[in-house]
């Protein structure tokens, strides 16, 4: 059974940092691209960032470019999102998601989702 | 303002068919794969269609996806009350080098 379990969320002040982690199991982790998707209160789904199977290719939404960094450790079956210079508008439920393909720019679709981890940015 | 345009809402009675459109451009839908998601209140989204028209195991064949040019469509036949949810399309945008979602469509079963 595929499982994606996020951790590392919480309440943080504007300008501070937070690191999200996602532990994956039930599939061959290093065969697939992985992404972070978020949902802010009252808004729709927003793609945040993606990383290819080998970490060679990455992508970021304009809203987070330069502030967030995605990474993965295939030996630990783990995905990460380092979030710096957090803003109030980054407040959202963050989902770790698995792609059906292995290259981030191919983006076949997100066939498995974690339950999400809440990040609240507030003073 | 999303790169992909979806109608904000659609409604129909049980048993009817609804279609949800997703309009984009050559840098996204026109040259990349489209996927569709259903999000029920309080739950994580689930994929209905991936790689334009493939349906994961466990998704009823009442759900179908198609793509033509720079637009994609999700069809739901035999509408059920349990289909009331928000639906999103998504694809890669080669010009932005980023994934993009549509703004979402709320389906109401009358």
Image (cartoon, coloured by chain):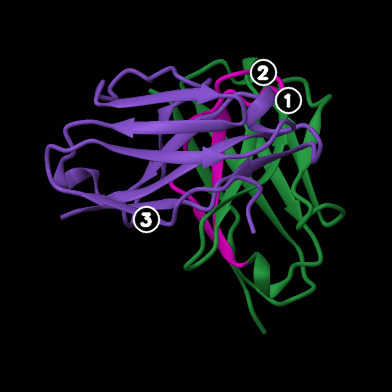
Chain colours: A green, B purple
Could you say which is closer to the camera, residue B85 or residue B79?
B79
Residue B41 colored in magenta in the image: no
Residue range corresponding to the magenta coloring: A91-119
Chain of the residue under label 1: A
Q: Is residue A55 visible?
A: yes
Q: Secondary structure at mark 2?
A: loop
Which residue bears the numbered disc 3?
A: B9
Q: Secondary structure at mark 1?
A: loop
Which residue bears the numbered disc 2?
A: A102
On screen, residue B82 above or below A117: above
Left or right of A93 on screen, residue B27 = right
Residues behind callouts 3 and 1 on a single chain: no
Cβ atoms under marks 1 and 2 closer than 8 Å? yes
- Label 2 neighbourhood size at 10 Å, few (<14), some (14-19), many (20+)? many
Left or right of B49 on screen, residue A68 = right
Residues behind callouts 2 and 3 on a single chain: no
C-alpha distance separating marks 2 and 3: 33 Å
How many numbered discs?
3
Q: Residue furthest right?
A: A66
C-alpha distance separating marks 1 and 2: 6 Å
Chain of the residue under label 2: A
On screen, residue A87 above or below B16: below
Q: Position of residue B23 (x, y in %)?
A: 57, 40
Cβ atoms under marks 3 and 1 closer than 8 Å? no
C-alpha distance separating marks 3 and 1: 34 Å
Chain of the residue under label 3: B
Which residue bears the numbered disc 1?
A: A52
Q: Nearer the viewer, mark 2 or mark 3?
A: 3
Please report whichever mark, 1 or 2, sits nearer to the chain's N-terminal start: 1
Residue A105 colored in magenta in the image: yes
Q: Position of residue A14 (x, y in %)?
A: 74, 76
Task: Please identify the quadrant where the N terminus of chain A is shown.
Answer: top left
């Amino acid at each position: 059974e595929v499982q994606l379990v996020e951790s590392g969320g919480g309440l943080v002040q504007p300008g501070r940092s937070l690191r999200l982690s996602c532990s994956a199991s039930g599939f061959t982790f290093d065969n697939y691209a992985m992404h972070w998707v978020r949902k802010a209160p009252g808004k729709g789904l927003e793609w945040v960032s993606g990383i290819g199977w080998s970490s060679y290719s990455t992508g970021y939404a304009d809203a987070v470019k330069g502030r967030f960094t995605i990474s993965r450790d295939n030996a630990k079956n783990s995905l990460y999102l380092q979030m710096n210079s957090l803003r109030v508008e980054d407040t959202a439920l963050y989902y770790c998601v698995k792609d059906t393909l292995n290259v981030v720019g191919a983006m076949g679709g997100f066939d498995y989702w974690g339950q999400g981890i809440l990040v609240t940015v507030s003073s | 303002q999303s790169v992909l345009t979806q109608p904000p809402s659609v409604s129909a009675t049980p048993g009817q068919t609804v279609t949800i459109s997703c309009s984009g451009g050559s840098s996204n839908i026109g040259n990349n794969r489209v996927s569709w998601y259903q999000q029920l209140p309080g739950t994580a989204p689930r994929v209905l269609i991936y790689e334009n028209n493939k349906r994961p195991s466990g998704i009823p064949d009442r759900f179908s996806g198609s793509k033509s040019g720079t637009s994609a469509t999700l069809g739901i036949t035999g509408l059920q009350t349990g289909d009331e949810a928000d639906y999103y399309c998504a694809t890669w945008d080669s010009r932005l080098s980023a994934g993009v979602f549509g703004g979402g469509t709320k389906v109401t079963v009358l």
